[in-house]
Amino acid sequence: MVVILENNATEEQVKNVKQHLEDFGFQIHESSGVQRTILGAIGVKPGFDIRKVKILEGVADVYRVTSPFKLASRNFKEEKTIIKIKDVEIGGDHIAVMSGPCSIESEEQIFKLAEIVARSGAKILRGGAFKPRSSPYSFQGLGEDGLKMMRAAADKFNLLVITEVMQIDQIELIEKYTDIFQLGARNMQNFSLLKELAQSKVPVMIKRGLASTIEEWLMSAEYILAGGNNNVILCERGIRTFEPYTRNTFDLSAIPVVHQKSHLPVVADPSHATGLRNQVPPMARAAVAAGADALMIEIHHDPENALSDGPQALLPDTYLQLMKELREIAHAIGKTI
Ligand code: PEP
Ligand code: MN
């Protein structure tokens, strides 16, 4: 941690700041220039609240040099994490694709879409049975019936399943049907849910919160890792900004940032990031080029009548064409899809 003192800080104030730093357990390295004094504080604990120093009299600014996340950081683990689930790997040179409907709506729907997912070469079927909807009047999901339908469809076409868990009391049930838990954007900082998911052996994909920084997102990953579940995947799904032409703003630069800061794989979700079908293919192509380890794409054979997120679902033909294009982009950067 670096503590910069005000130009006109009095000797008394500097002494007081140093005393506090010592009391907090830091080792201090002082560098006094003509203009100002800078203190290097060594030994910052991950959970230390730097505001305790910021509020001291005479302090101009405080910067953290080390990150507050530890197990999720590249310093802790240099090599990239590859999550292995049955015969699928996420985080290596093969880009995994998770596609399917926003919600599981019926047996007919999920079997039809699972066939398209398998035909596209994707290995993971997505679909929600418990849906976090902005309106209580919107379709809330089919619950366990939906999970049963999706598991059967996935097994028929040799696919893995990813589905959202919204609350602690759903973990045990969903574990019976899924290969990956999806922790939704709205639950990214549901710390009690994170702690419970950390007790599971099932991989967890954490979607970035609507208004969360990359550091906060990595701190959520830290919760799962600290609790003993090493199978953590991150998913960039767009953040809320002032721009209304897209549903969210796709923070593509989060992909290289996460790769620099963390060893964990990162998935890109251009469907929720843009919210409109015609914007999904260009952003999916960009995500592969930016180095995403996997993609999450919503598809529907009858989006007009979809029970959720129809406007962002790709039609099967567009999706199959997109997968071909993505393969070429992946090839150009030494990867496969
Ligand atoms: C979803 O994947 O359908 C979903 C609700 O995603 P998010 O949590 O990113 O909004
Ligand atoms: Mn959706």
Image (cartoon, helix red, strand yellow):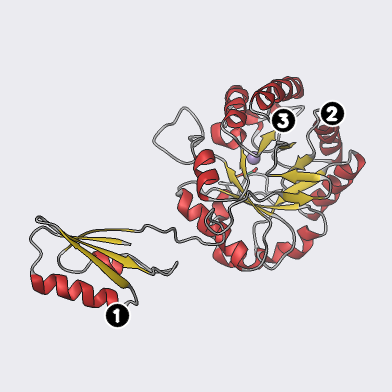
Examine the rendered structure and indicate whether residue 245 appears above or below residue 238.
Answer: above
- Between 324 and 289, the one lying in front of the other is 289
Ranked by sequence position, the earlier of labels 3 and 2 is 2
Label 2, secondary structure: give it. helix
Q: Is residue 248 left or right of residue 225?
A: left
Q: Say which amino acid is labelled 1.
A: Asp
Which is closer to the viewer, label 3 or label 2? 2
Give the image location of residue 215, x and y in percent: 46, 53
Q: CA distance from mark 1 to mark 3?
A: 63 Å
x 48%, y 41%: residue: 239
Q: Say which amino acid is labelled 2.
A: Arg
Q: CA distance from mark 3 to mark 2?
A: 23 Å
Ranked by sequence position, the earlier of labels 2 and 1 is 1
State yes or no: discs 3 and 2 in contact (Cβ < 8 Å): no
Residue 61 lies in what quarter of the image? bottom left
State yes or no: discs 2 and 1 in contact (Cβ < 8 Å): no
